[in-house]
Structure formats: C-alpha cells, structure tokens
Amino acid sequence: NLKVDFSTGQLHFVVPLDVWAKKDLGITSPEATGQLNLNITTSYSINKDWNLETNTRLNDYEWGQKPKVKIGGFDFSVKMLADKILNRSKTIIEEGLDTQLAQRLDLRRIVEETWSFIYKPITLSKELGIVLSILPVDISLAPLQVLDENLLIKLFLVGQGTLHLGKDLESLGTETIVLPEFRFESTENQDFIVRLSAFLDYHSLEKIAQQLLIGKVFTF
C-alpha cells in the first residue's frame, strides 16, 4: 500500500509483516503468530553519480492480528512482549528496509544500461545499407512517480542522430561519452525533437543508383 509525497522528497508506505516465533522450553515448544502493518517513511535523495540514497524510519505499527502463543491447546496473548521486541528491533528493521531498497532499485544500473543501449547502431535498410547511429550527450530524470503501485522512472535523453549510407556497422558506436552527472528535468519539457545529420558515400550512392535505375524503363 504505497502513498508517495514527492514534494517533500519522501515515500510513505505500509509494509505488511507476518510474525512467527518458536521457543524451546524443554518440555514444550510454544509458537507465537501474528500479523502487523508497519507505517514507514523513507526520505530519499540521488547523488551526482546517480546512486539512490535512502533513510528509512519506522513511524509506528498496527496489529492486524494480535500475537498469541499456543500452549497446551490454549491461546495466550503476548502483545506486550511482542511490542517490546519490536521497539528494540526498530533500528534493525529500518536498516533492513534501506538495504532492500538499495538492492531492488539500482538507479545507476538502469541509467547506465539505457546510456549504453543508445550507442548501438540500428540498421534501417540492409538492401540500401542505411544505418542510424545516435551519440547520447545528455540524460536527466523526471521526478519519480507511482503508477498502479509501480514506481515509474522516466528518463530524458538528448542525442545526436546520424544517418550513414554504405557505412560499416563495426566502425559505428565506438565513440563513448562519460555518463553526465545526475540532474532532475521538469516534466513540462516533454517535446520530442529529431535532428539528423546524413553522411553519404559517393560509391554507395552510385551503387544504389545502379540498383534503382539500371534495367528500368521510364515512359513519359
């Protein structure tokens, strides 16, 4: 159950947690079960290297099913004991959630994979030998959003596109530019502008002209 307030740079969410404990008392081994909801607030920031940094705090919790221990077929409430254990474990829970967030939301890896993917040249026409290459020059991030309980990461990319005619694919996509430092981009800037440079090899043009014209009959 995720509720997000990005204006303050915080994530507010509820984490359901099932509780199970067992204690060996020699004669018997009573088990305790319960269910609670943790109310969590995570403050986040993104450093210049595109690494997500979080600071999670456990605000409070609510028992959905109060913990009970079974002894001799009878259920006994151990809520007060469970509350003490939870309060002592507060720091462990907070650090554990920060670790999970870092592992599951590796923002730098996502950006690096996108940055590298843009370098790959695209064959538009094998027959005519037309290849499109894009050289990325800038990348930025829109404010994080939640859509249908999923975190939406929207990247803005600026690149220089070039159309090649008769170019060897292996010679393209070799130039690299260091990943720029992180910065936010306004969501108002969502224009899609394409500017292309075209490099035409004379011999390739001659070959295409031959393919298109030789043997053809034109009538007027």
Image (tube, rainbow, N blue to C red):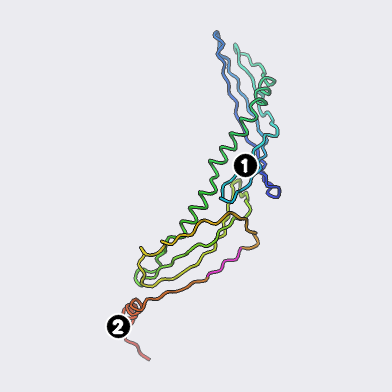
Q: Residue 128 appears in which quarter of the rendering?
A: bottom left
Residue position marked by numbered label 1 in the rendering: 54
Residue 113 at what x, y percent from top left? 48, 53
In the rendered image, the quadrant that contains the N terminus is top right
Residue 33 at what x, y percent from top left? 60, 23
Residue at mark 2 to residue at mark 1: CA–CA distance: 66 Å
Q: Is residue 42 magenta?
A: no
Q: What residue occupies the far bottom of the structure in this picture?
A: 220
- Front position among marks 2 and 1: 1
Q: Residue at 30% x, 83% y: name it.
A: 214
- First in residue order: circle 2 vs circle 1: 1
Q: Residue 13 appears in which quarter of the rendering?
A: top right
Q: Residue 56 appears in which quarter of the rendering?
A: top right
Residue position marked by numbered label 2 in the rendering: 214
| 114 left or right, relative to 15 | left
- Which amino acid, mark 2? Ile
Q: Residue at 62% x, 55% y: name it.
A: 184
Residue 191 at what x, y percent from top left? 60, 66
Q: Tell how many labels.
A: 2
- Which amino acid, mark 1? Thr
- What kind of element bears circle 1? strand
Extent of the magenta region = 190-194
Position above or below: 132 against 30: below
